[in-house]
Image (tube, rainbow, N blue to C red):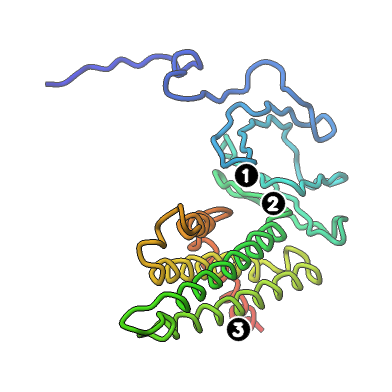
Amino acid sequence: MTTEIRTEPLSASAFAEFGDVLEARGSPDNIINQGNCGRYNDLALMEMLPGGRTGISIFDAKPRSLPYVCDMLERHPFGAQAFIPMHSNPYLVIVAPSAGGKPATPRAFIAGPGRGFEIAKGRLGPGRVHHCMRAIGAAERTLELMIKRAATREAFGRPLAKLGGNPDIIANARMAIEQARLLTLKCAWALDTKGVAGALQEVSMIKAVVPSMLQKIVDDAIQIHGGAGVSDDDFPLTALYGYARVLRLADGPDEVHRAMVARLELRKYQNRKQQ
């Protein structure tokens, strides 16, 4: 049995049950770029974690031609922006690295038809360092709980700290914390001395390494605590595990950051080969 479905015009009211319709109608909410672009602001908002905010806007800009004189640059330090064209024409992308808060020499790119791009959030680097610093502190707290439990709880007449592979677990936790701490310190140094653009690899490395380190240590601590490890009434380990697991997704999942590390590493060898 088949059902015949008739098409109908797409409108905001007709589609309201299913979601939002994004359309640039009427006068723009803001006129920007010296009057050359109209912005239809926040036509849709998306659900985010507490403190986050993401909106979708439509820009209607006047077409330009080459050669083009760029006499204005805007700085967006507090948010990432993704631009997706609604036409099939190539377009010009002009960006500039930061030099002490001021634009350095701009670079111009021609984006092919249908290609979008994203301007990275200027505070993502320091923000990720902050995440990792907190995660390292959480790992220290977890290791403290693990050692207290292993030193005071006995099985088969011996403390847990001296049973089986538990000494290895404790040693590996300490070494992993120190490795993560030093990598985070190097990332902070790179941000201070080279800026976000020069520390992209270090930022991605700590974001991939530190939350996984915390998750592993919390998991080991839960195991040493036994049933008490999953009791919210006695120990905070399940909350710490949830925090670590979420952190492996927040600000980009592990896979994205490892891909960034690999891409930047491969680029070094490509540059050497060209030389």
Please provide percent x and percent y for residue 29.
73, 22
Q: Callout 1 environment at 10 Å: few (<14), some (14 to 19), or many (20+)? A: few
Please say if the residues under marks 2 and 1 sit with CB atoms less than 8 Å apart.
no
Q: Which disc is residue 82 wearing? A: 1
Return the residue found at the far left: 1
Please provide percent x and percent y for residue 100.
87, 61
Q: Which disc is residue 40 wearing? A: none
Please provide percent x and percent y for residue 138.
59, 64
- Residue at 50 percent across and 62 percent down: it is 254
Mark positioned earlier in the residue sequence (2 or 3) = 2
Please say if the residues under marks 2 and 3 sit with CB atoms less than 8 Å apart.
no
Mark positioned earlier in the residue sequence (2 or 1) = 1
Quadrant where the C terminus is found in the figure = bottom right
- Closer to the camera, 40 or 229? 229
Mark 1 residue type: Ala
Q: Is residue 9 left or right of residue 73?
A: left
Please provide percent x and percent y for residue 226.
36, 67
- Residue at 63 percent across and 64 percent down: it is 132
- Residue at 41 percent across and 86 percent down: it is 162
Mark 3 residue type: Lys
Q: Residues under labels 2 and 1: Cα distance?
A: 10 Å
Mark positioned earlier in the residue sequence (3 or 1) = 1
Disc 3 designates what residue?
Answer: 273
Mark 2 residue type: Lys
Please say if the residues under marks 3 and 1 sit with CB atoms less than 8 Å apart.
no
Disc 2 designates what residue?
Answer: 121
- Closer to the camera, 83 or 232? 232
Depth check, mark 2 against mark 1: the one in front is: 2
Quadrant where the N terminus is found in the figure = top left
